[in-house]
C-alpha cells in the first residue's frame, strides 16, 4: 500500500461520516467565505497508466445531477496539477500501484461534493 493511499484511508477513518450532507465554509470565486452544503462522495471508474507516462482525465461537467462550477484538488500527488476540469499527473516508477485522488466539486446549487478518481499505475 502506498503512503498516499494509507494517508487517504486514515483521513477517511478519522473524518468518519463528515462526507455526508453538512454545512462547510469555503471560498467563492472572489475569495469571500460562503456557507455551502457538502454531499456524499461520488466516484469515477478506475483508469490505468504506465509509469513514466502522463495520466490525463477530464472531470465530469456535473456531479449528483448538478452542474460543476469548479474543482479543487485535495492532497494531489507530486507532479500533478488541475486545470479547470482537466487533471494531469506525470507518473514515475515510484508511483506504481493503485491510487485514489480526491477533488472537491463546487456545484451550481452552492453545495460541495467530493469526487474521487481511481488511478492504477503499472
Image (cartoon, rainbow, N blue to C red):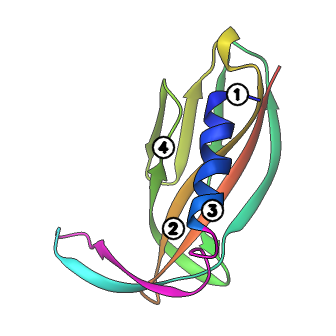
Q: Which mark is residue 37?
A: none
Which quadrant holds residue 23?
bottom left
Q: Residues within 10 Å of mark 1 (few under 14, many from 20)?
A: few
Name the residue located 21 percent from the left edge and 77 percent from the top edge.
Answer: 33
Report the span colored magenta: 16-30
- How many neighbours does mark 4 have within 10 angstroms: few (below 14), some (14-19), or many (20 or more)? few
Q: Which residue is mark 2?
A: 105
Residue 49 magenta: no
Residue 88 located left or right of residue 49: left
Whole-percent x, y for residue 30 in the image: 17, 70
| For marks 4 and 3 on the same chain, the one whose residue lies earlier in the sequence | 4
Residue beneath disc 4 = 75
Among the 4 quarters of the image, the one containing residue 110: bottom left
Residue 5, image x, y percentages? 68, 38
Q: Report how far apart the C-alphas of labels 3 and 2 lie in the structure.
A: 7 Å
Q: Are marks 2 and 4 in contact (CB under 8 Å)?
A: no
Q: Residues within 10 Å of mark 2 (few under 14, many from 20)?
A: many
The image shows residue 110, relative to residue 12, as above or below, that is below
Residue shown at 62%/81% (left/top)? 20
Q: Secondary structure at mark 1?
A: loop
Q: Earlier in the sequence, mark 3 or mark 2?
A: 2
Q: In the drawing, does residue 44 fall left or right of residue 78?
A: right
Kindly report which numbered mark, 1 or 4, lies closer to the viewer in this rendering. Answer: 1
- Which numbered disc, 1 or 4, marks the residue that appears first in the sequence? 1
Residue at the spot of label 3: 115
Work out whether mark 2 precedes mark 4 in sequence or the reverse, and give the earlier one.
4
Q: Secondary structure at mark 2?
A: strand
Q: CA distance from mark 1 to mark 3?
A: 20 Å
User: Looking at the picture, does residue 117 appear above or below residue 6?
Assistant: below
- From the image, which quarter does the C terminus lie in? top right
Amino acid at each position: 500500500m502506498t503512503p498516499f493511499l494509507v494517508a487517504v484511508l486514515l483521513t477517511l477513518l478519522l473524518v468518519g461520516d463528515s462526507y455526508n450532507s453538512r454545512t462547510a465554509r469555503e471560498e467563492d470565486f472572489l475569495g469571500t467565505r460562503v456557507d455551502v452544503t457538502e454531499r456524499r462522495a461520488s466516484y469515477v471508474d478506475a483508469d490505468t497508466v504506465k509509469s513514466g507516462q502522463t495520466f490525463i482525465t477530464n472531470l465530469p461537467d456535473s456531479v449528483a445531477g448538478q452542474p460543476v462550477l469548479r474543482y479543487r484538488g485535495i492532497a494531489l500527488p507530486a507532479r500533478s496539477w488541475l486545470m479547470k476540469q482537466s487533471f494531469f499527473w506525470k507518473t514515475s516508477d515510484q508511483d506504481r500501484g493503485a491510487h485514489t485522488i480526491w477533488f472537491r466539486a463546487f456545484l451550481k446549487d452552492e453545495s460541495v461534493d467530493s469526487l474521487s478518481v481511481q488511478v492504477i499505475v503499472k
